[in-house]
């Protein structure tokens, strides 16, 4: 049985993931592609943290969150293996767009990043809704 505290934290983090997707969509409309890459990555990061909140796990490092999510949810086939590649791709593009001075990202590339993030968050949301309903 999941604790009310862990469920509430999970829901909070899922809401943040969805807010970041909305932000990414708005920034795409504005042509702010580097911000879209950033928000797309952080949406999946928040989604992973929402899942891990049900276990009472968190990490101060992105690598810790990603490793735990992969180990317990991708490796164990709770989520499809394709999500692992999406994590890497979204993280790489986000890091390049945030830190590389002359990195240029195309509208097509960033649109794909956003679509991948939406897919990822959608799968997480479906999973979490099942977890929440099984606990009521």
Image (cartoon, rainbow, N blue to C red):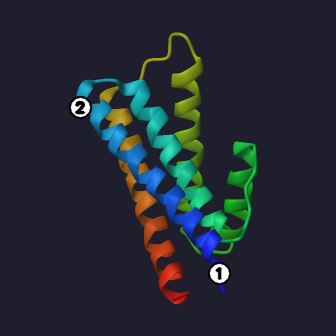
Q: Nearer the viewer, residue 53 or 112?
A: 53
| Residue 2 marker | 1
**Residue located 31% across and 29% down the image:** 107
Find residue 73 and report its image quarter: bottom right
- Left-right relation of 111 to 90: left
Q: Position of residue 6 (x, y in %)?
A: 64, 70
- Left-right relation of 113 to 135: left
Q: Is residue 76 above or below residue 93?
A: below
| Residue 64 marker | none
Q: Nearer the viewer, residue 49 or 76?
A: 49
Q: Position of residue 124 (x, y in %)?
A: 49, 66
- Left-right relation of 80 to 60: left
Q: Is residue 73 above or below residue 45?
A: below
Outermost residue, left direction? 29
- Labels 2 and 1: the sequence-earlier one: 1
**Residue located 68% across and 61% down the image:** 70
Q: Secondary structure at mark 1?
A: loop
**Residue located 47% across and 85% down the image:** 133
Identify the residue position indicated by label 2 in the image: 29
Q: CA distance from mark 2 to mark 1?
A: 40 Å
Foreground disc of the pair 2, 1: 1
Find residue 60 and report its image quarter: top right
């Amino acid at each position: 049985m999941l604790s009310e505290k862990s469920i509430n934290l999970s829901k909070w983090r899922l809401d943040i993931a969805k807010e970041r997707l909305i932000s990414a969509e708005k920034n795409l409309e504005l042509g702010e592609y580097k911000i879209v890459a950033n928000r797309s990555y952080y949406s999946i990061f928040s989604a992973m943290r929402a899942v891990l909140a049900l276990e009472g796990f968190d990490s101060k490092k992105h690598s810790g969150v990603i490793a735990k999510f992969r180990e317990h949810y991708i490796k164990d086939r709770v989520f499809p293996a394709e999500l692992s590649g999406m994590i890497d791709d979204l993280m790489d593009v986000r890091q390049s767009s945030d830190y590389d001075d002359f990195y240029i990202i195309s509208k097509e590339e960033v649109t794909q990043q956003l679509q991948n993030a939406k897919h990822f968050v959608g799968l997480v949301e479906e999973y979490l809704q099942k977890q929440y309903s099984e606990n009521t």
